[in-house]
Image (tube, rainbow, N blue to C red):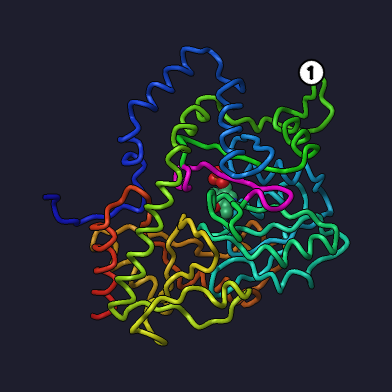
Amino acid sequence: MSSPVTRVALLDPKRAFAPLADELKQACARVLESGRYIMGPEVEGFEQACASYLGVKHAIGVSSGTDALLVALMALGVGHGDEAILPTYTFFATAGSVARLGAKPVFVDSCPRCFNIDPQAIEALISKKTKALIPVHLFGQAAELAPIMALGKRHGLPVIEDACQAIGAEWHERRVGGITELGCFSFFPSKNLGGFGDAGLVTTQDDKLATTLRHLRSHGEVTRYDHQLLGANFRIDALQCALLSIKLKHLDAYTAARQKHAALYTKLLSEAGVGAHGSAGACCPACASSDTAKSKAGKGAPVVLPFAAQSRHVFNQYVIRAPGRRDGLRDFLKDKGVDTAVYYPVPLHLQKAFAYLGHKPGEFKVAEAAAADSLALPVWAEMTSDEVTYVAERIIEFCRR
Ligand SMILES: *Cc1c(COP(=O)(O)O)cnc(C)c1O
């Protein structure tokens, strides 16, 4: 019998490593002994495996998810004076990569149900300076792409999917990151396909963009020492590719485990009358008709459960909302040995780094409310159902005090 749970970590990458240890060490040894550490067959093999998994023509390995965004924007020629439209409720890199190129991140509020960019708020922000639309598939759930792609088409704007949290997630039976002009992925250890350090990927169906991306990744070099573009060193490591190739084969099993944990949280919290889906407005029909859990709690439940509106939510995060008592719940869980996280405590429009844009509190109400009351529970693939149950029981305990 396993010992009773007393502590649940937010993530434990060593548990993912353990069952694959021999295979990973062998791959490591193979690369070390090959003497080929930059580019080469390991990188090509991994890129091909990713392209086939994602159903895209081109997959280009890069140094991180952040650099995937940066190089995607560079390939589109985004620079000084340009603008890109993106959600304020996301990880910093989505906007940071735009700003680093001298362009302006133009923020949009989110849908109160699925946390993704509100597509209805985009069109009013499109100007002559707009060069790209960047929806983020936040927490592992596809953003509603149809209206965004329609806007892109109407205004001649490319759409970059920030799929860093959503590898394997689907939108209308298509894997995200391969649906619009460009897709960006991260293999940061906490992502669904977690690497052993930093790494990322850019995807595209477009041959010309793919060639440009490959050049940009290596200093704009077209042939040795013939630099035709201003690129940089955005290469992925051969060693990382060898290791990630092994984990990629298990990605669907990791996803299934995350979905199982998410379903258990939803079941336990809703059956206890503690959690229910919120009644706030939706960003799109899919979101509006999302699978509301059978709940005894109904309106006024202390905990708002995450929606799973789209066809395949891969639960990079299971994010609940506890309006008015998030910090109290977080402290209580910490006391009971449960680690949680807040994604994200400050929306990007209120970050100091973007103070020069002149935004004020109250401008993006959904994002600001989400920042104040959202809480991410542990939902990594290798955790046990006992651990999920322990976390859910502690939340129920807190709500019934
Ligand atoms: C993780 C993440 C990134 C950046 O990826 P890194 O590999 O950490 O650079 C970008 N956007 C989103 C939404 C992310 O979650």
Q: Residue at x 31, y 41 (%)?
A: 15
Toward the front, the furthest residue is 173
Indicate left or right for 288 with 343 as reference: right
Indicate left or right for 293 with 87 as reference: left
Tally of marks: 1
Q: Residue at x 74, y 33 (%)?
A: 216
Toward the left, the furthest residue is 1
Q: Residue at x 55, y 37 (%)?
A: 199
The amino acid marked with disc number 1 is Tyr
Tell me the quarter of the picture where residue 47 sits. Answer: top right
Tell me the quarter of the picture where residue 340 sits. Answer: bottom left
Q: Position of residue 57 (x, y in %)?
A: 69, 39
Where are the magenta residues, as a range?
Answer: 177-193
Q: Residue at x 55, y 24 (%)?
A: 42
Q: Position of residue 268 (x, y in %)?
A: 29, 71
Quarter placement of the C terminus = bottom left
Q: Position of residue 124 (x, y in %)?
A: 79, 73
Per the picture, the main secondary structure of the magenta-coloured stretch is loop
Indicate left or right for 69 with 334 as reference: right
Q: Is residue 103 above or below residue 329?
A: above
Residue ID for mark 1:
225
